[in-house]
Image (tube, rainbow, N blue to C red):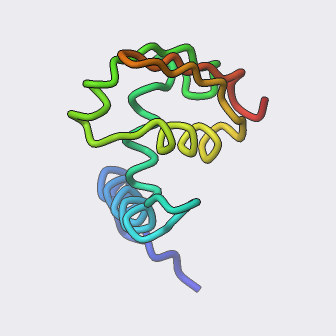
Amino acid sequence: MESKYAGMTADQMRRAVQAEQDAFEATTWSDGFLVADLRKAFELVQDRENWKNPVNFLVGNSVLDKMGLTVDMIEEAIVYFQGCVPKINHNVNFVHIKSSGYVC
């Protein structure tokens, strides 16, 4: 059986795999959220060096509102991508989100 990627250049293969990943995330749900939305939330809070590193993120509530994100969505995103339940301190103006990192 021939690979569905046979005959593709490396760049074509990367684009095909990304398209498959995007389609999966746009149609797959986790705890009431589309995985595509969880990725958007996780990309906001993840460590920029390595997504597996601990999360320590402070954000204003108004920023979350403008981005269409919720604290519940961010919490589920960390659980989905890192496997940990984050500690969240939420007040009127800010949210402080911390997690130990990938598979705590």
Report the number of discs: 0
- Quarter of the image where the C terminus is located: top right
Q: Residue furthest bottom?
A: 1
Front residue (pair 4, 83): 83
Name above or below for residue 69 compared with residue 22: above
Q: Residue shown at 58%/60% (left/top)?
A: 31
* 91 relative to 55 in the view: left or right: left
Where is residue 46 drawn, in percent x and y? 49, 25
Please tell me in which quadrant of the rendered image residue 52 appears: top right
Q: Residue shown at 60%/42% (left/top)?
A: 81
Q: Residue shown at 40%/66% (left/top)?
A: 20
* 7 relative to 2 in the view: left or right: left
- Quarter of the image where the N terminus is located: bottom right
Where is residue 102 drawn, in percent x and y? 70, 31
Q: Residue furthest left?
A: 66
Front residue (pair 6, 34): 34
Name above or below for residue 73 compared with residue 94: below
Where is residue 51 drawn, in percent x and y? 55, 28
Please tell me in which quadrant of the rendered image residue 50 appears: top right
Where is residue 53 drawn, in percent x and y? 63, 20
Front residue (pair 71, 56): 71
Q: Residue furthest right?
A: 104
* 78 relative to 39 in the view: left or right: right
Name above or below for residue 86 compared with residue 6: above
Q: Residue shown at 27%/42% (left/top)?
A: 68
* 52 relative to 74 in the view: left or right: right
